[in-house]
Image (spheres, grey):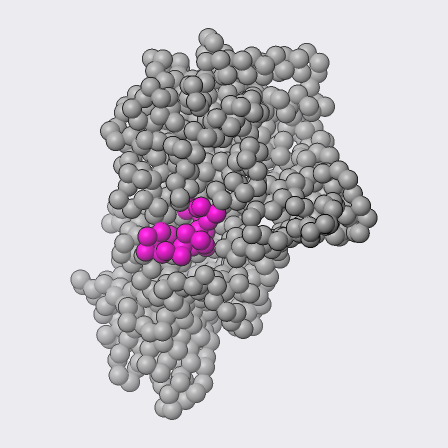
Amino acid sequence: MDSPPVLKTKYGYFDEAEREYVITHGDTPAPWVNVISNGDYGLIVSQAGGGYSWRTHAGLNRITRWEQDLVRDEWGKFLYLRDAQTGEFWSPSWQPCGHNLEPYRVRHGLGYSVIESTRGDIDSQVTYFVPLQDPCEIWLLRLVNRSEKPRHIQVFSYFEWLLGSAPDWHREFRILFIETRYNALRGALLAGNVMWDIPGERGPHWNRDWPYVAFHSASEPVQGFEGYKRAFLGRHGSPGNPQALHRGSLQGTQGRFGDAIGSLQIDLELPPGKEIEVAFTLGAANNEDQALALLEHYKSLAFVHTALTAARRHWNDLTSELLVETPDSALNLVANGWLPYQAISGRLWGRSAYYQTGGAFGFRDQLQDSLVWLLLGRPEQTRAQIRLHAAHQYQDGIVLHWWHPLAEAGLRSEYSDDLLWLPYVVLRYIDETGDFTCLDEEMPFLDGGSASLGKHCLCALEAALNRRSPRGLPLILKGDWNDGLNAVGAGGRGESIWMAHFLYYLLTRWVELPLLDTETRLRYRNQAEQLYQVTNLDGWDGAWYWRATTDTGELIGSAQNDEGQIYLNAQTWAVLSGMATPERAAQALQAARQRLYQPYGPLLLAPAYTQPDPKIGYLTRYAPGLRENGGVYVHAACWAILAERKVHGVQAAYDLWRSFCPAARGMEPDAYVAEPYVMPGNVDGPLSPSAGRGGWTWYTGSAAWYLRALIEGVLGIDATVDGLRVQAALPDGWDGYRVRRRFRQATYDIQVRRAAPGETPGCTIDEQPWQADVLPILEAGSEHRVKYICR
Ligand code: GLC
């Protein structure tokens, strides 16, 4: 059942009950996509039907070809429909040839997307999804003949095989190794590749097989197939106007001697008023037996429907672990479903998008993303991520900046902060679980040997402590969290104030843990104190903290600079780390408010750099206002929400949260441009002619952080070792809110409401009064109603 449209614009609306975003026009201002992954296999589908597929690594193991062109968005895995009587053909999606479909509706949901369109009397609906357990995807096509005549409809599929690392710009070389084979008995196309050019320890580079068998099949008898592009498109043909569709038949090409594609033809008789379903399957199995078994399973429509229901239920159950109800519908819509889904399906599992195609793990990136599991009551998943990252640390504490699964090749980090995210995420894991024994778990190092997780973290802290300038500030090296500051300290002398905040925070928290011996605890206390002194003495610019020094001792993020005078992170983390005194915290945020906050979010720095500065790094090479160069860098903007809450309280935190809420900003879709249902990586700053425009969606660490900034910073619910801490407070205009959250395996249904006149504020748990702001740890499996009455 459709629920009433929420936050409707000329391009679409939210369907709250189904947790879908419904797009009503194919010509959205940018591709509005869905990233669907089961943790191994994944696909992206845009509102136009563009996209690509991969297994395990979207860059090293891309199954289908795609070119990054967000304007044309013309690469995809397509279906065509053809009226066998008239020869008329179209595609049920906007691309490659269906621009005149009306009505047109795309429903992006959690774990699936549906494209619905009508051409004449034929309604079509294509549901794309990835089954939970299998390395494949399904396109479930449903056709309805609304006419009074029987119709003979031919269906053709079409995509290009890649079967290896992307992009394959030297296509004429690549096609020499790919083979397509039609299995007549099974009515399926199989494809393999005998050259996989990936580096790494698991096999030689440029001399190794692609160890999978790709397959493409359908649930109805196959009337024809094509394995060569030339035969399908025709010489100078195009996906929008392929010769095969003019002909109405395929020619049965296959083998090793053409440019490899996959195309199947199905012929359907559609009686008047009737509907029919066909499922197409595309995947990459471990071997031929598995490929044949999978395609056989998914020939059954019943099996397909069961798999679709299971996938939908999975995402629904997972995202329902956290329930947020507030008077702000934009807030509710992103919090309940889309943010956790983006963080998991997009960032942790798919690790790819339209603006950034990827596949690697970033040491700091996916560790931070994995914090989302804590909010969903699944800390074991955060723990698994911790294990994975700890295994990518060397014995000297240094970690890989990123690494490629499959190839197991990576880059030893020369960024100063990467290694510190391990002790950071471990702290948050302990806050959530109270489980100190995690520190004892033995985990391998990348260069051999193993140590307890606690030791891994201490190695990281020690390495960071050792990399400091003569006056004791952390060296920035080839960058810190801000990758683009990659020249500031490349010579090994430049310093980072943000790193000083971060390290200070970690030291002051790690000294509380039972793990440290007395000597180390004392040493860390002294080091923290020393960092505090030097940062506050030297790092304070007068009205805010400066950000860094260069190898030659020049300040970055200081009033002395013409550009890049103030950086957001050096102010927000001064507050979050406890490094700033209350006066300085207020002053630093005041400066940020005056100089960085825009109606559409807080800028990462200002003013933006207008000229490349080789002494600072590639950040200055972005056009002014884009990405980290003075745009709203949304990941960092989330920290400002948490800092605002600490210094100015709930109203300030909420106002800031809302200033870059995509569902709210998306109400002006032509100006905002990006998808309204997921976080953008950045929003253009004031020097861009499109100030306020969102971009680089999906692949951004902001999804997990924005959710955390909401739960902790706005709704005031935070995990601590002692229990769940609730600081109930209401923004103006709210009479209450509710958060249902799992914590230590119990469910806390927290309801906050405003006191009626004369009513005394207070808290009850299951109707019993409770005084402290930390809730007790309740029995595993139990559920409790916590009520707060506040002013
Ligand atoms: C990119 C990187 C991330 C970094 C951020 C800021 O998003 O993936 O690791 O922290 O940019 O520069």
**For the view shown, which residue lies furthest in the right direction?**
768
Which residue: 40% across, 85% down? Answer: 146
Residue 26 covered by magenta stretch: no
Residue 677 covered by magenta stretch: yes
Which residue: 55% across, 32% down? Answer: 647
Can you give x and y, in whole percent of width and height, for residue 551 in the image?
Answer: 36, 15
Can you give x and y, in whole percent of width and height, for residue 230 in the image?
Answer: 23, 62
Can you give x and y, in whole percent of width and height, for residue 406 in the image?
Answer: 47, 41
Residue 600 seen in this snapshot: yes
Instruction: Indicate the quadrant where residue 515 lies.
Output: top right
**Is residue 559 shown left or right of residue 739?**
left
In terms of depth relative to the viewer, which is nearer, 500 or 789? 789
Q: Classify 352 as above or below 584.
A: below
Look at the image and give the residue range highlighted in magenta.
Answer: 658-682
Q: Classify 541 as above or below 69.
A: above
In terms of depth relative to the viewer, which is nearer, 484 or 665? 665
In terms of depth relative to the viewer, which is nearer, 374 or 557? 557
**Is residue 205 shown left or right of residue 36?**
left
In terms of depth relative to the viewer, which is nearer, 277 or 723? 723
